[in-house]
Image (cartoon, rainbow, N blue to C red):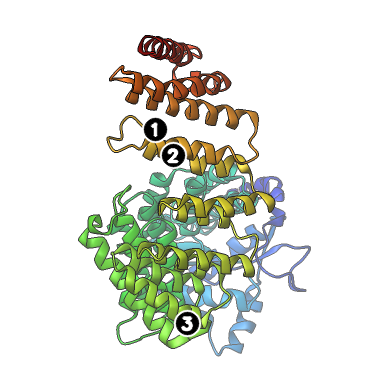
């Protein structure tokens, strides 16, 4: 009876796992105790059935002494079996596990034995949690035929491990549900120490590692699961995500492909997996996965996904900084064309029910590969279907700009203003269009309207500054036009600027006049002095007004004003001498 005494001593420890009941409470359970289905041990070839019956009886009596679990009595098991037209001697382990929920049992037990002379060899021993299907194996062992209680005690000791493992298992999942992943990981580890074969806990451990930003360890855990169960759907799905986020695109695609072998015809599953690949960074892999699903099926949903993923894959295949169509790699061009082909098919099928973002992608894809006329043509076709879509008009305006239809591009933006007055950067974009086209005078009225509508005049002034500096004042530009730069600063100062921006514009205005004076004074003649004297005179007060800005470009505040005075003195001297 040593085994029974041991189980009794463990009852106090087991009390702390009373909430572990994993089956529904029924009248057959007493005070929430979990029922355990313990059939007679299965004899090999019908040998010594009575011995297996006696050991099962001893085990039931031991379990019945626990505060948390109770066995289903043998007669009750037989009664239940009759409902299914079964006999105790006909049972095997698989049937026992299947019958456990039908009998409201939270745990099922099964074991086989064979006769070996006066000994009995026990094998295939396991407890199975009916809800999670977690299996708790017990090592094979051998006892003398008279040691029935000892055999039950040895199995009972394993049942104690099961109870402890269930406790850690519960905490593993509960802490994960509470998003305390460090605590979840500790309890998962403790549960796996007691039962390394619990694949459910191992999967939860992988998820905890993922949340703790240990993706390499999580992926290793996934591989451990797949070594045992190569088509574990949860593990394959997680493995695909982890491998993709780790930059292992081919491995990620392999995981997902194996997952789809289990669900080969599930379009929704394929779309979800492709989306997971896309969000993990493998847009091309997502595209290829969708393409496989399109074989023989022109689903508009799949075509839409294909176009969107091909579009992003094309962007990813284009080196950063590349904007000219002729510099876009051939691989990216092919992907853009794939996107156009797929999305135009969706447009033909769905018309005005198509996602406008996908419509815009068609226009953008044409523009990216240098087919601006096609971009404009399709945009005009789409606008007939979506006349009130501000985002589409915005894309259309960009396409018009690429074919130098500046007035039409501005008109498209002004149409947006009618539809959605608060659309971002409307005035700035109209201003930029005119400025880039060399039509600064057309830009100024729009800027005034923008200020009246509440736009920041200082930000608008910077658009003028950028253009005036680049094309008029930048010494690195061999084709700079000082008069253009000067007039740009004058235009910027017509806006109501704050002190800081005003100082910047004054500095560069004065600098432009100073540089023009330098360029014209070189002959040092009466005529050149008379022409340049007003330039130096006008530059000095402007440079002094912008003195607070000068240090931001590495120039001492008085350096250029002092130089301008020296040149002014020289021009005055030349004029006096000439007279």
**Nearer to me, 477 or 358:** 477
Q: Are marks 3 and 2 in contact (CB under 8 Å)?
A: no
**Nearer to me, 28 or 449:** 449
Measuring from the top left, give residue 286's x and y in whole percent: 36, 66
The number of discs equals 3
Quadrant of the drawing holding the C terminus: top left
The residue carrying mark 3 is 90
Q: Secondary structure at mark 1?
A: helix
Q: Are marks 1 and 2 in contact (CB under 8 Å)?
A: yes
Residue 322 circle label: none
Q: Is residue 61 above or below residue 80?
A: above
The residue carrying mark 1 is 473
Q: Secondary structure at mark 2?
A: helix
The residue carrying mark 2 is 468
Identify the residue shown where x is 50% and y is 73%.
356
Residue 155 shows in the view: yes
Left or right of 247 in this view: 105: right
Asked which quadrant contains residue 78, the reply is: bottom right
Identify the residue shown where x is 45% and y is 24%.
535
**Nearer to me, 417 or 129:** 417
Measuring from the top left, give residue 413's x and y in whole percent: 53, 64
């Amino acid at each position: 009876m040593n085994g029974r005494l041991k189980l009794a001593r463990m009852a106090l420890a087991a009390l702390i796992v009373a909430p572990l009941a994993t089956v529904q409470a029924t009248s057959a359970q007493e005070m929430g105790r979990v029922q355990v289905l313990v059939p007679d041990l299965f004899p090999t070839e019908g040998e010594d059935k009575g011995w297996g019956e006696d050991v099962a009886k001893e085990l039931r009596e031991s379990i019945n002494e626990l505060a948390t679990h109770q066995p289903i009595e043998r007669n009750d098991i037989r009664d239940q079996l009759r409902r299914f037209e079964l006999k105790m001697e006909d049972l095997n382990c698989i049937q026992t596990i299947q019958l456990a929920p039908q009998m409201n049992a939270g745990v099922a037990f099964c074991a086989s034995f064979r006769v070996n002379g006066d000994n009995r060899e026990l094998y295939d021993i396991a407890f199975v949690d009916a809800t999670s299907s977690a299996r708790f194996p017990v090592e094979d062992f051998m006892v003398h035929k008279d040691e029935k209680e000892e055999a039950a005690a040895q199995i009972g000791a394993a049942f104690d491990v099961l109870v402890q493992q269930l406790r850690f298992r519960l905490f593993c999942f509960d802490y994960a549900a509470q998003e305390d992943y460090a605590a979840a990981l500790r309890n998962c580890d403790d549960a796996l120490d007691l039962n390394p074969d619990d694949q459910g806990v191992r999967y939860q451990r992988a998820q905890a590692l993922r949340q703790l930003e240990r993706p390499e360890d999580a992926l290793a855990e996934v591989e451990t699961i797949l070594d045992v169960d190569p088509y574990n759907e949860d593990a394959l799905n997680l493995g695909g995500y982890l491998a993709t986020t780790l930059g292992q695109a081919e491995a990620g695609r392999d995981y997902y492909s194996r997952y789809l072998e289990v669900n080969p015809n599930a379009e929704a599953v394929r779309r979800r997996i492709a989306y997971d690949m896309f969000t993990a960074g493998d847009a091309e892999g997502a595209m290829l996965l969708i393409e496989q699903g399109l074989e023989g099926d022109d689903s508009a949903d799949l075509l839409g996904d294909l176009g969107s993923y091909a579009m992003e894959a094309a962007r990813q295949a284009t080196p950063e900084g590349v904007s000219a169509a002729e510099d876009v790699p051939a691989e990216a061009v092919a992907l853009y064309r794939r996107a156009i082909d797929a999305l135009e098919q969706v447009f033909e099928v769905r018309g005005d029910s198509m996602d406008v973002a996908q419509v815009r992608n068609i226009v953008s894809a044409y523009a990216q590969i240098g087919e601006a006329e096609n971009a404009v043509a399709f945009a005009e076709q789409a606008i007939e279907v979506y006349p009130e879509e501000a985002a589409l008009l915005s894309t259309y305006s960009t396409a018009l700009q690429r074919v130098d239809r500046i007035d039409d591009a501005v008109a498209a933006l002004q149409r947006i203003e009618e539809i959605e007055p608060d659309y971002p950067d409307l005035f700035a974009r109209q201003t930029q269009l005119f400025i880039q086209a060399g039509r600064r005078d057309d830009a100024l009225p729009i800027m005034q309207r923008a200020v009246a509508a509440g736009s920041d005049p200082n930000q608008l002034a910077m658009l003028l500054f950028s253009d005036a500096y680049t094309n008029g004042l930048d010494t690195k530009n061999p084709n700079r036009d000082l008069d253009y730069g000067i007039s740009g600063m004058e235009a910027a100062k017509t806006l109501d600027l704050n002190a800081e921006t005003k100082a910047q514009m004054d500095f560069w205005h004065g600098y432009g006049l100073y540089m023009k004076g330098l360029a014209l004074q070189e002959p040092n003649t009466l005529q050149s002095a008379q022409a340049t004297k007003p330039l130096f005179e006008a530059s000095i007060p402007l440079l002094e007004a912008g003195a607070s800005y000068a240090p931001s470009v590495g120039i001492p505040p008085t350096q250029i004003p002092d130089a301008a005075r020296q040149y002014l003195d020289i021009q005055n001297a030349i004029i006096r001498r000439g007279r």
